[in-house]
Image (cartoon, helix red, strand yellow):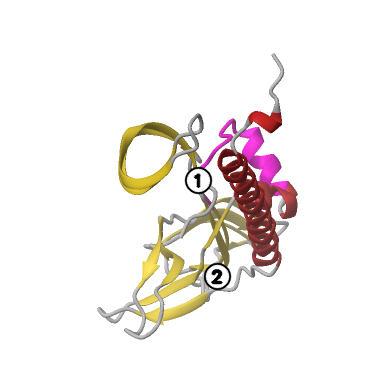
Amino acid sequence: MKIDINKIPKTVLLWGILLALVFVILFLIKSCNAERHYANSLAKIANYKDTVKTYKSKSGKLIEYNLALKVDLKSLSAIKDSLYNYINSIDIPEPDVIIQTKTVTKIDSIPVIKFVTINGKFDTTFYIKEKYYSIAGNVNNKRLALDSINIPNKSTVVVGERETKWWKKNEYIITIDNSNPYVHNTGMQSYTLEERESKWSIGPSLGYGIYMDPFKGNTGHGVLLGIGVSYNFINF
């Protein structure tokens, strides 16, 4: 079936051209926004440092924290290849939050071990048990042997917005609290993956606008009620 363009009312043709132009413009805007968002995400990840910062909470507790990023998995995989490979290896293709931390355990002093000497030789088996660590081993005139070193620790990780000054925007941060005072954080990073909302929607619609009869070429305005399918190009 061939359509004779000359028989199409000029009003319908003009509306069709106008709608096509609007569609093209919205598509270009959407593409530009997507490219800009992707470039910004890459820049944020590339410049993201695992610096450990501190602040004092209202209760007086010193909190270690760092800024947390909200990114998409595509941007993360482009920069953090090793992290992306790890995600694939644990069979969780769409994680919600990814956290990386670096810790070091420093024990400033260890209790003195007394040597027992018999006939010019010494042989001492020792076991040091403190609240936050324990060490077991043996010392003799030939060697020092450590049987075990135990340093228990419980880490509490919280990701969310921190209230700052009333005139400043809340900070999206990660905080880590260690139960063992000998365990210190030397680095931390957190990536919260943004969910991609569906652009398509279908359902009843009610509103006020301009309508057109494509067959008769009549236009008008008024209340519109119906069921339609829509695609969201731009979010405000």
State the residue at coordinates (62%, 40%). 13
Q: Give whichever of 201, 208 is nearer the camera.
A: 208
Q: Where 162 sits versus 195, above or below?
A: below
> In this figure, which residue is indicated by the disc labeled 2?
106
Mark 1 and mark 2: Cα distance apart in space: 54 Å
Residue 73 lies, in percent from the top left, at 62, 46
Pointers 1 and 2 in contact (C-beta within 8 Å): no
Q: Look at the image and say whether residue 89 sits in the magenta stretch.
A: yes
In the rendered image, which quarter is residue 124 located in?
bottom right
Residue 54 lies, in percent from the top left, at 46, 79
Looking at numbered disc 2 in the image, what kind of residue is underneath it?
Lys
Q: Could you classify mark 2 by the number of other residues whose Cα lies within 10 Å: few (under 14), some (14-19), or many (20 or more)? A: few
> In this figure, which residue is indicated by the disc labeled 1?
232
Answer with left or right where residue 102 lies relative to residue 161.
right
Magenta segment boundaries in residue numbering: 82-98
State the residue at coordinates (59%, 73%). 51
Between disc 1 and disc 2, whose residue precedes?
2
Residue 80 lies, in percent from the top left, at 71, 53
